[in-house]
Amino acid sequence: MSEDILGTAAAWAAEGEQVAIATVVETWGSSPRPAGSMLAITASGRMAGSVSGGCIEGAVADVAKQTMADGKPQLLDFGISDERAWEVGLACGGKLKVFVEKLG
Amino acid sequence: MTPEHLARLQQARAALRPVVMTTRLSDGIQVLWPEDALPGALAEAAQKAMADDKAANVTLDGEAWFLQPHNPPLRMIVVGAVHVAQALVAMAAGLGFAVTLVDPRRAFATEERFEGVTLNHEWPDEAMEALAPDARTAVVTLTHDPKLDDPALDVALRGKAFYIGALGSKRTHAKRAERLKELGHDEAAVARIAAPVGLDIGAITAPEIALSILAQVVARRRGK
């Protein structure tokens, strides 16, 4: 079966999990995942899909926890011009924007 | 995303209805187009995102919107329930294709050999007419038998399939090309057929041949 991130997210929500969805909305340069790529995350730490080659998933998961808590969507910038990118190790040299929203 | 929006999106996907999830990035407000209306410029952009099968960003009146198309899965029609098909349909499903396997020979096209696969036991021309391959469909013939492959290719060449591949050696294909020309297909039409099928990676085993076919299908899909 092909990956169905939204289906997985819906199944997790049906199990009573708190779920957030992160989506790549824009990329510049050599980003490994194209716009539209999704990562579903639960408050309990389950993850499905990806928004990068693994460079920023940890940072996105941290923001997702905040979004699950306060319900506020976030638009995140990652890139070499962004100091935070060094913190999370965006080594690919690309830039991308990720939208994080709560399911619910 | 509200549970209601997710449920409606999943319903549309299950019903193979193409939709575009449109998100206002400042606050996460969402519109599921075309079931919900969008203002003109956004609707046009949504139409384009759907046609291109590519996410898009639009700024309208100072607001940034993200448009994500959800098209039905690409289809793959495999003719011939042979050994290579067993590997191919499993791997194609993994790549997200909705696969239909066509073979009137019920001894080959069994549930046991193709568990969970959509099987079609019609004669290939009838099956292909009914399945109507479009620009989001790949067609692969694997029977090696002109009685089965030729009618399938005949129908496929009259449609817009983005990929048509046929198993068989150069010599087999040369004869096949002649037969298809006799059916009224010109040189350019016959040249659409990838044959011998698959990228030349020296494939020998059934899964290796399936891999070479899928690699070629992906390359065609991505314009390489």
Image: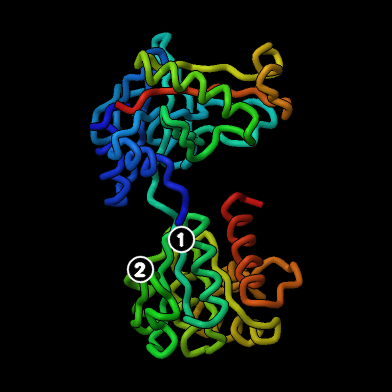
Residue B80 screen position, x and y as percent: 48, 81
Q: In which quarter of the view is residue A55 placed?
A: top right
Residue B160 visible here: no
Q: From the viewer's perspective, tell me whether residue B83 is left or right of residue A82.
A: left
User: What residue occupies the far top of the structure in this picture?
Assistant: B62
Instruction: Please name the amino acid that badge 2 sits on.
Output: Leu
Residue B52 screen position, x and y as percent: 48, 41
Query: Is disc 2 in contact with disc 1, using a CB cutoff of under 8 Å?
Result: yes
Return the residue at label 1: B137
Q: Are marks 2 and 1 on the same chain?
A: yes
Q: Is residue B134 above or below residue B185?
A: above
User: What residue occupies the far front of the structure in this picture?
Assistant: A44
Name which residue lies at 70% across and 13% down: A81
At mark 2, the secondary structure is helix
Q: From the viewer's perspective, tell me whether residue A84 is left or right of residue B134.
A: right
Total tally of numbered discs in the picture: 2
Q: From the viewer's perspective, tell me whether residue B190 is left or right of residue A75.
A: right
Q: Is residue B84 above or below residue B135?
A: below
User: What residue occupies the far right of the structure in this picture?
Assistant: B202
Q: Label for residue B131?
A: 2
Q: Looking at the image, is mark 2 or mark 1 earlier in the sequence?
A: 2
